Image (tube, rainbow, N blue to C red):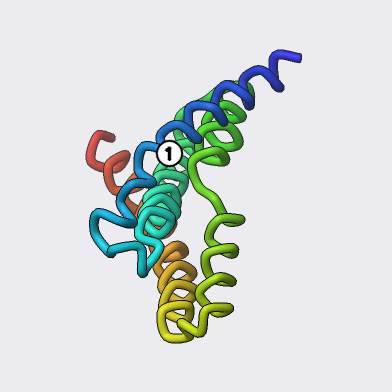
Amino acid sequence: MFRLFFIALGGALGTLVRYLISGLDYKFSGGIFPVSTFVVNLSGSLIIGFLWGISDRIVVSPNVRLFVFMGILGGYTTFSTFTLESFNLLRDGEYGIAAANILLSAIFGIGFVFIGFFASKFLINMFD
C-alpha cells in the first residue's frame, strides 16, 4: 500500500513541475513548436540517466526508487503529450516541424540519458 502512496505522491510532484514549465511554449515559440514538452522530456532524460548512474553506487530503498523514477519522473515527463503534439502538427500539415519534434526528441532524449549517466559516473569517480 505504501508503494502506491509513494508513486502517487511522486507523480503529483512531477506533474506540478511539468505544469509550471508548460508556459514556455507561448513565451518562446508562439505556440508553433512544443517547447515545454521538449524541455521536460530532455531534462527528464538527463535526470533519469544521472540518477540511474548514481543508483549503481548508492543503496536506495525500493520505495525511494519508486517515488523518484516512477512517481516524480513518470509524472514529469510525458510521452503521450509528445505524441499528441506530433500528431496535431502532422494533421495541420506542419510536416517539417513535426519531423523536427520527433527526431530531435528521440535523438536528444537518448543522448541526454547517456550524458546524465556518464556525468554521474564522472562525479562519482572524482570523489572516490
The answer to whether one can see residue 117 in this image is: no
Which of these two is toward me, 49 or 42?
42
Left or right, residue 86 beside residue 46? right
| Residue 4 placement (x, y as % from top left) | 71, 22
Q: Is residue 97 above or below residue 19?
A: below
Q: Residue shown at 43%/55% (left/top)?
A: 37
Left or right, residue 3 beside residue 34? right
Q: Residue lying at the far top in this picture: please name it.
A: 2
| Residue 69 placement (x, y as % from top left) | 55, 37
Left or right, residue 40 beside residue 24? right
Q: Is residue 25 above or below residue 60?
A: below
Q: Quadrant of the C terminus?
A: top left
Left or right, residue 115 beside residue 68? left
Q: Residue shown at 50%/35% (left/top)?
A: 15
Q: Quadrant of the N terminus?
A: top right
The answer to whether one can see residue 125 in this image is: yes
**In this figure, which residue is indicated by the disc labeled 1?**
19
- As helix, strand or loop, the secondary structure at mark 1 comes to helix
Q: Residue lying at the far right in this picture: please name it.
A: 1
Q: Is residue 23 above or below residue 101?
A: above
Amino acid type at image mark 1: Tyr
**Image-quadrant location for residue 124:** top left
**Image-quadrant location for residue 70:** top right
| Residue 118 placement (x, y as % from top left) | 36, 54
**Image-quadrant location for residue 81:** bottom right
